[in-house]
Image (tube, rainbow, N blue to C red):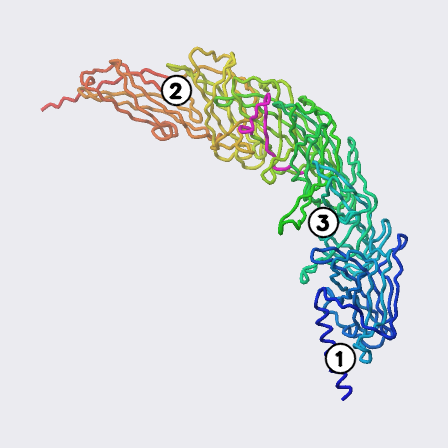
Amino acid sequence: MIKHRNRNTYNALLLSTLVICQLPGYTVSAASGASNDISTTISAVTANKTTNSLSYIQIGSNIKATLEDVNIWPQAEGNILTYTLNYSNGSNSDMNMIHYFSRVVTPAGSVIPGNPVTGDALKKKVVSKESLRVTYYVNVGKTDSLKGVKIPMYVWDAKTKGYLKQVGTFSLPANYSPTAASGKSLTTTINDIPVTANTESLQINKHNGKVYAKVGISLTNRGKKVLGDPGYTAYLVSAGGTSFELALDSSQVAYKIQPQEKKVIYYLTEIPAYLKTDNMKLQFVQKDETLKLELPKSSYKLPAAKVPDLTVGKGVVKKILINNNTIETQLNNATVYAENDMGIWSIQFRLKNSGNKAVTLPSYELAVKSSKGKTFPINAKALSGMTLKPLEEKIIQLTAQLPLEVEQNTLQLQMIEAVTADTTATPGATAKLTFPVAYYTIPYTPRPDTHSGLEYKTTNPHGSFTYSLQSLQRFPWKDDDIVVAKLRIVNTQSVTLSLPDLKGALKVDNKDLTSSTELFMDKQSTALAPGETAEIYVLAKVDYTMKFNSLKVILYSISNEENVPFLTLSTKSTMNAVEKIDRGGSYTVTGKGKNAKVQENKTTVYEGVNSNIVYTEMIMSSEEKRQSKMARLQAYYKTADGELYEAASNQSDASAAPSGKQLITFWTKLPKSVSTSDIALYVGPGITGNKLSEPGQETTGFINIASLALSPQKSVANLTNVALYPYTLSIKGSDGKHMEGSDTISIVLNYDLLKDSSYDTGTFNHKLMLKMTDPYGKSQEKAVVLGTDLTEGSNNSFTMTFNSNMYKDLYGGPYKLTLYDELQGERIELASQTYSLTYEKLKVIEE
């Protein structure tokens, strides 16, 4: 019965104790007395020694409780005090936590039960020979200091009045401080992993009229598991007690620290300009979402604040730490040129990961700052979020535009880290922190002009190479002119140079021709092996009357819908003369699958009624080793006085066999007053997009133009030898007959028609007309189609009839046959011949 009564009493007391422990802020006037009360006084934590283990109390046989990490943190609903008890069970049986209790006694005498934080609420026992850490919290109201605070310990004892036996008291002395001294290490636990921590630095920087603080703390993982970011909230606390929530450096979000590894973690915040920065501390708190409280963790006194000199000299390497990896940064090169009252800057920014781990760069903002403090933001997308492998080096191409009224030789490139931090002012809102990283001095180097034929060295994000302006030419095109800049790029590295998908732009005297600019690079692969060369043509259309003195060539690629510079050059070089090819010489076409030689076959001047027609036949000989389509040629006729006439062309669209030949014809109309004695043909392959045009494709320009001197001849022929390539027509004779009283003349042509099949030709577009002039001098015409009306072969005949009422009274006489070639609306006489008409009388039938 006694045992039963004691058990009931224990259960009732236990229930009441659990209820009391669950009432935040519950206080009692005094602790229950105990005849064997033991008081343990904790030594002050001095500047020479900081530790999280304060003292211990023996609470049972081979069982002790060690007090650790006593902290206090002010909050609106009452200041929260936390403390950790490390229970060590050296006995041979498990320790039931329900037998042990702790309370907090404030300097005012209030006694408040300690309640486990949410994360430790389910810890119910300590296994034999092991230890268990439990963190408790109490709401101490307006108490804001640990001075005079005591923490008594109790155990369940049925023999003690009130059933609780006080076994000792942890007393915090007046000079106790939970904050680790500056420069001293503190051994604590994070996520149940032992960690050695000490503060590294406190930096103060001003930017855009605001003041920012950057706090560095080093953490060394002394455990055997990876330490992850515990999600603590960090505060910068001034000597007067004002706190500012810190944002974790964006490059270290969700950091990991390996066992025995040391990392420096950085936090940022904005502070008022008037705030005194001496005797500041770093305070960590942990949010308990269930309790809706911030629970204080460890705190550290910070070293004296320093204002670092962030200015980086010309060409100097600036090392920065990102996630404890050293990154070398350097403003590698910068050039400027003037355009439309603006200074156009091109800046190369070099980064190298000298660490042994891959690093992803945080978000940065870049701006060019003048000596008077005016800033001009520039695009930093290529920099922010970049990943650098160990020992990897990258170069970022930056561009900036500044008004020329700004002094261009005293500029700095500002590199600002942009951090987004949660703010408690408005739920769900974010605040942006911009913390200066470095101010790089920009060397003032006006961009030099590029001279034709000279080689220049450069480096960009894709690698190092030399470039040269091979030629600069101007050619006619439709109603405009085409300006063509030919560039050569040579890979000077020992590794492959990968070219991006390049675009081109031309500017003449600052007039932007980008809308009409095209880029041609006859290279299927954009990878250049060491020493390999690529030739690039950048061409744009200009008004043929335009005159200009300077030209800019811009190569760029497009990434994320933005232009990324590759190479820019300026030149005042004069236009190169067109390559001249003497009469009888050959013109060479070069290009993948398009290599060929072109030579004049003949040039004929047909004298028309209203104009003359120059007609040229060219033989294109393939130099490919397999069947391929040849390039479509574009051409202009140039007269001795410099006038240019666009040539129409006819070219086969069939693939040429190896060493195969194709016949290409060009022709144009010339005014009767224009001399054709020194005429030349400006000829070159057309381009369509980034490829050489093929026959049948629409061309947008042409390149590699050469001037081919022609040997024009006037058309002189007779019907026995009429050449119309690929045909040759020979009319051997004509037999014309007229029957007495008939209104019809019948004419038979005897002819040979041969086709030269050694050439591929385009569609035969000549229109042949045969005119018969009768003995009265009257003419009639008939269209004759070669290959249809007149068939191929020898000793062929073709019969034509002509009718007129006048022929009924005709008794013979001469008739004349004239052959015309109609080309571009002009009728050109090829040859003529007169024949005799045979008169046949009607037979008289005698009865």
Give residue 720's mark.
2
Sooner in the amino-acid sequence: mark 1 or mark 3: 1
- Image coordinates for residue 271, horizontal then vertical, percent: 73, 43
The numbered disc on residue 157 is none
Q: CA distance from mark 2 to mark 1?
A: 138 Å
Per the image, label 2 sits on a secondary structure element best described as loop
**Label 3: which secondary element:** strand
Q: Is residue 680 left or right of residue 170?
A: left
Amino acid at the residue labelled 2: Thr
Residue beneath disc 3: 245
Residue at x-position 74% and y-position 28% = 443
Q: In this view of the protein, which residue sits in the foreground, 836 or 64?
A: 64
Earlier-in-chain disc, 2 versus 1: 1
Q: Is residue 675 left or right of residue 805?
A: right
Tally of numbered tags: 3
Is there a contact, CB below 8 Å, between mark 2 and mark 1? no
Badge 2, how many Cα within 10 Å: few under 14, some, many 20+?
Answer: some
Discs 3, 2 touching: Cβ within 8 Å:
no
In this view, the mark in front (2 or 1): 1
**In the displayed structure image, the side of residue 23 where residue 133 appears, left or right:** right
Instruction: Please report the residue visible at 79 percent of the width from the left and 46 percent of the height from the top.
Output: 355
Q: Position of residue 748 (x, y in %)?
A: 30, 24
- Against 682, residue 208 (above or below) is below
